[in-house]
Image (tube, rainbow, N blue to C red):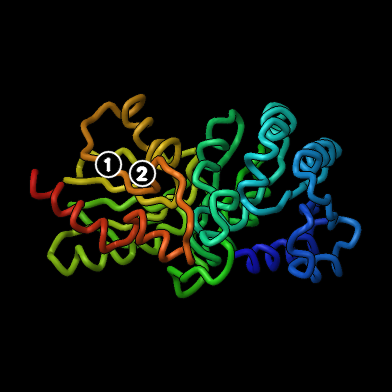
């Protein structure tokens, strides 16, 4: 997904002279083509993420459209105070890009894991939170983010994430995207967890259980119009590669309690409240914590059996 981000940004920067990038001393070769088309708008801010956020705020105030980019924990947690005050409170249109989200850097341990970034960003007023499922969703959403006059957090993977589409989907920022319609189970998938949702959908359909598969690429604001039908399902399942505390499933649960006020049989699937270490790769990490279709399917069937 990071390669697609660099490609899209290069294409946009070639057309829009106000678009610029600040990055924290990573991906130097990744942005070579961007440097060719926008050499004065491609800035290595160094390993100084807090300064980078503040610089972007000033540039946005001067009329530019900055992106700030580095590995997810460093572009959300390390500079949280600057994001809170200089970007969210100032309410400036800066896109904060976190690459390698969730378990993408599983083998590097908790310093590089990002289980709390959605929670940190969605709690901030004025902040929009966008989590594309793959590089094709990212390609569809990138130009749309530049139409928003508020700060945005863009959560992306690292590289070689499986594709969920054959071509760039016709999706809209802030709107849920239904890939498969169904009646009994509703799978609400956040970001790269759509791949897990796709496997679960196939397995449930094989068992004769009508299932709807939906990409919730925009976590904030939620598509409240789409969510109005949740009570019609025997079971609603949220899937995400983020802590169960404060993430996408929590946002859905909060909305049910505070706004919807109808009974929903809700199963939240994500990362448990603990640190995970000594991992080989993302797949081994997902197996360790039970975030696979094989682990989740029995939980869904058990919930349905109680209906």
Question: Residue 6 appears at what percent x and percent y?
Answer: 70, 65
Question: Residue 4 appears at what percent x and percent y?
Answer: 63, 67
Compare residues 77 and 267 and report the one nearer the observer: 77
Q: Residue at x 35, y 56 (%)?
A: 291
Q: Residue at x 51, y 41 (%)?
A: 116
**Residue position for label 2:** 226
Q: Quadrant of residue 62?
A: top right
Are the two marked residues, 2 and 1, in contact with CB atoms closer than 8 angstroms? yes
* Residue 130 sits above or below residue 51 on the image: below
**Residue position for label 1:** 229
As drawn, is 155 to the left or to the right of 41?
left
Q: How many marks?
A: 2
Q: In terms of secondary structure, where does tag 2 sit?
A: helix
Compare residues 194 and 269 and report the one nearer the observer: 269
As drawn, is 286 to the left or to the right of 113?
left
As drawn, is 58 to the left or to the right of 225?
right
* Residue 34 sits above or below residue 178 on the image: below
Quadrant the N terminus occupies: bottom right
Q: What whole-number distance in Å separates the C-alpha atoms at marks 2 and 1?
A: 7 Å
Q: In terms of secondary structure, where does tag 1 sit?
A: loop
Question: Residue 155 appears at what percent x and percent y?
Answer: 57, 51
Question: Residue 279 appears at what percent x and percent y?
Answer: 47, 61
Q: Quadrant of residue 2?
A: bottom right
Q: Residue at x 65, y 54 (%)?
A: 71
């Amino acid at each position: 997904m990071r390669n697609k981000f660099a490609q899209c940004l290069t294409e946009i920067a070639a057309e829009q002279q106000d678009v610029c990038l600040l990055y924290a001393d990573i991906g130097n070769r990744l942005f070579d083509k961007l440097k060719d088309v926008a050499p004065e708008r491609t800035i290595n801010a160094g390993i100084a993420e807090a300064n980078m956020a503040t610089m972007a705020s000033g540039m946005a105030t001067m009329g530019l459209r900055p992106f700030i980019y580095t590995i997810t924990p460093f572009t959300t947690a390390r500079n949280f105070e600057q994001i809170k005050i200089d970007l969210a409170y100032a309410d400036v249109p800066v896109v904060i890009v976190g690459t390698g989200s969730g378990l993408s850097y599983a083998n590097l341990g908790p310093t590089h894991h990002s289980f709390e970034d959605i929670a940190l960003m969605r709690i901030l007023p004025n902040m929009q939170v966008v989590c594309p499922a793959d590089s094709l969703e990212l390609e569809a959403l990138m130009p749309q983010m530049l139409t928003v006059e508020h700060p945005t957090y863009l959560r992306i993977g690292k590289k070689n994430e499986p594709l969920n589409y054959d071509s760039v989907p016709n999706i809209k920022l802030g709107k849920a995207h239904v890939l498969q319609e169904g009646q009994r189970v509703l799978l609400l998938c956040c970001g790269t967890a759509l791949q897990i949702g796709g496997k679960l959908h196939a397995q449930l359909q094989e068992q004769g259980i009508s299932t709807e598969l939906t990409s919730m690429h925009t976590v904030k604001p939620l598509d409240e119009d789409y969510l109005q039908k949740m009570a019609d399902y025997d079971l609603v399942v949220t899937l995400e590669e983020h802590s169960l505390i404060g993430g996408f499933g929590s946002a859905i649960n909060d909305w049910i309690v505070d706004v919807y006020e109808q009974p929903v049989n809700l199963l939240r699937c994500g990362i448990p409240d603990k640190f995970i270490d000594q991992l080989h790769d993302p797949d081994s990490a997902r197996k360790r914590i039970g975030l696979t279709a094989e682990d989740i399917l029995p939980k869904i069937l058990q919930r349905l059996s109680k209906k």
